[in-house]
């Protein structure tokens, strides 16, 4: 083996090692996305299902915990940025253009999600205002809170659609690369498409049940943490894609 060949082999090994490290990092960030779910649970438990005033009193009594719930959503959004970068570096050798496209969709998802969190903090101020003397009565504040909540819901829907497109592409690249088990990659692709269909349907038919959104997000909601654990524990099979490339050549 010549010196040039040795240098090329060494460079390839270093590149695969960096790629595997980013894959494990992406796996960790997949698990951090659970902060989003934690935040939603905290907020819904505090708000309850009662009237506007009842929710306002409950939020005022647990304001710190409510803010923690909102912050959990922010952590989840920030984690998405890091996740997208990790997945991009991992899958760039498979198809750089598609990996970049997926990265941009996931980054757009994060930006739109951050806007939704800003709306949630604005909604918090409206609820808190209801517990103090104000130029607005409870009915006006309730209508304003409902408007902000509905707007935030639309923003979240759009964010999920961007997520679905990016997720579909990333899982497709995993399927193409054979870095992970085929069934998991297919599960991710189908789950992402199913999620996108549900949330697009909700935008077109806003009177549809919230249960439809929960059902639409369930498959990918399970696939993502499973993939996260797989990447974190088992990593990726970089040799599998290398073998496919050699075979095609």
Image (tube, rainbow, N blue to C red):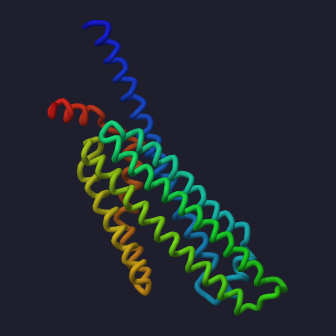
- Residue extending farthest to the top is 2
Query: Exactly how many numbered labels are in the figure?
Result: 0
Task: Say if 98 sits above or below 109 in the image.
Answer: above
Which residue occupies 60% across, 59% down?
74
Which residue occupies 76% across, 91% down?
137
- Residue extending farthest to the right is 133
Residue 64: percent from the left, percent from the top? 73, 67
Task: Say if 110 sits above or below 145 in the image.
Answer: above
Which residue occupies 34% across, 62% down?
192
Task: Say if 56 sits above or below 24 in the image.
Answer: below
Residue 86: percent from the left, percent from the top? 45, 42
Image-based side of 132 in relation to 32, left or right: right
Image-based side of 179 in relation to 89, left or right: left
Quarter of the image containing the C terminus? top left
In the rendered image, which quarter is residue 35 located in?
Answer: bottom right
Judging depth in this view, the residue of 90 and 107 nearest the camera is 107
Residue 180: percent from the left, percent from the top? 29, 44
Image-based side of 155 in relation to 213, left or right: right
In the rendered image, which quarter is residue 178 located in?
Answer: top left
Residue 244: percent from the left, percent from the top? 19, 35
Task: Say if 119 sits above or below 178 in the image.
Answer: below
Which residue occupies 64% across, 61% down?
71
Quarter of the image containing the N terminus? top left
Judging depth in this view, the residue of 55 and 156 nearest the camera is 156
């Amino acid at each position: 083996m010549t010196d040039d060949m040795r240098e090329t082999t060494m460079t390839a090994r270093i590149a695969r090692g960096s790629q595997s490290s980013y894959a494990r990092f992406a796996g960790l960030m997949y698990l951090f996305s659970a902060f989003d779910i934690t935040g939603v649970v905290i907020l819904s438990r505090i708000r309850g299902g009662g009237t506007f005033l009842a929710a306002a009193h409950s939020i005022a009594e647990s304001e710190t915990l409510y803010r923690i719930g909102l912050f959990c959503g922010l952590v989840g959004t920030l984690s998405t940025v890091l996740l997208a970068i990790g997945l991009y570096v991992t899958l760039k050798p498979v198809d750089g253009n598609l990996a970049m496209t997926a990265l941009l969709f996931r980054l757009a998802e994060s930006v739109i999600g951050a806007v939704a969190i800003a709306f949630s903090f604005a909604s918090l101020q409206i609820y808190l205002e209801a517990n103090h003397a104000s130029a607005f009565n409870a009915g006006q504040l309730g209508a304003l809170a409902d408007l902000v909540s509905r707007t935030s819901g639309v923003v979240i829907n759009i964010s999920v659609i961007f997520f679905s497109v990016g997720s579909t592409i990333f899982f497709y690249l995993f399927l193409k690369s054979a870095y992970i088990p085929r069934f998991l990659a297919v599960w991710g692709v189908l789950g992402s498409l199913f999620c996108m269909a549900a949330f697009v349907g909700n935008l077109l038919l806003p009177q549809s049940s919230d249960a439809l959104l929960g059902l639409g997000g369930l498959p990918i909601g399970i696939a993502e943490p499973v993939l996260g654990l797989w990447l974190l524990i088992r990593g990726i099979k970089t040799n599998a894609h290398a073998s496919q490339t050699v075979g095609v050549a």
